[in-house]
Amino acid sequence: MARAVTTQKKIMWTIFAWAFGLAMFFPILWTFLTSFKSEATAISDPPVWFLFDWTLENYAAVQERSNYPKALMNSIVIAVGSTLLGILIAVPAAWAMAFVPGKRTKDVLLWMLSTKMLPAVGVLYPLVLLAKYFDVMDSRILLIVVLMLINLPIIVWMLYTYFREIPVDILEAARMDGAGLKSEILYVLTPMALPGIASTVLLNIILAWNEAFWTILLTTVNAAPLTAFIASFSAPEGLFYAKLSAASMLAIAPILIMGWFSQKQLVRGLTFGAVK
């Protein structure tokens, strides 16, 4: 009887999980379908699901109107650059907090996370003034530094959590064998925390890729990534949903593909240390 109840619960949870997953995926599915509709079909009421004349004219219009390869390259450079720079800073910081903690270590971590609660617009004015002073407006280096600073608290927190799961005895054994600080971090700690570091890298690439507020405000032409590329399809005349959907699909396709192929690594890293 108990086995039957357990099986029933499993079926219910499976149905719930599929329903939740489909609900989460629905906006992407709707955007995908709309990108192949005409503008008239895209705003038809009642909406048309699959029985319409599929067309590629929206993708052709997007390619003619905007420089997609340049925006794609900017997104890749900015997302990867900000993440790698953040990892270089966060690994030593997380190591110090995890293995050489002080009285205020947790206070520092909480303070770093609290900066994520600050409205981004609150630091917009001084940041723009600094960017103009150093003459780096509309440049990749500006966005790399800004996005690194924005995501650094999350990177440090995630790495700190992963490092805390590593037994200190292993590091002490490495020190007794003569390993210095650099060798300890590079050849002992980093390989053991590789799943956590990999998931941190992937998650922060996704966060940097999807960042819209700063990328739209701090770029115009030269460093405009795909988020600014999507925003360029809003016009004073209104939103052209079919073309906007085509631009959105072109923008999210690379990150969707990356997420699909790295999903096992993401799950493994995010659950690292969850089961002891």
Image (cartoon, helix red, strand yellow):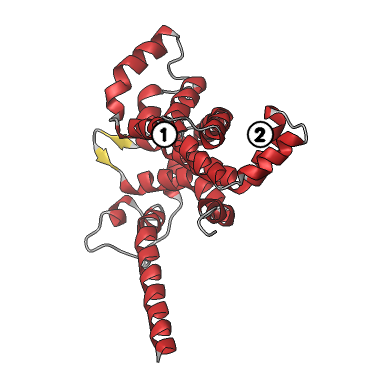
Q: Helix, strand, or loop for circle 2?
A: helix
**Label 1's element?**
helix
What residue is drawn where x is 42% and y is 59%?
54
Q: Nearer the viewer, residue 33 or 214?
A: 214
Q: Identify which amino acid the numbered label 2 is placed on.
A: Ile
Q: Nearer the viewer, residue 74 or 179?
A: 179
Residue 16: x and y in percent read 36, 71
Can residue 232 be seen here? The reply is: no
Q: Earlier in the sequence, mark 2 or mark 1?
A: 1
Residue furthest to the top in view is: 133
At x 44%, y 23%, the residue is 221
Q: Which residue is mark 2?
A: 185
**Up-down: is 141 above or below 19?**
above
> The C terminus is located in which quarter?
bottom right
Q: Which residue is mark 1?
A: 109
Label 1 sits on what residue type?
Leu
**Residue at left offset 38%, top offset 32%:** 107
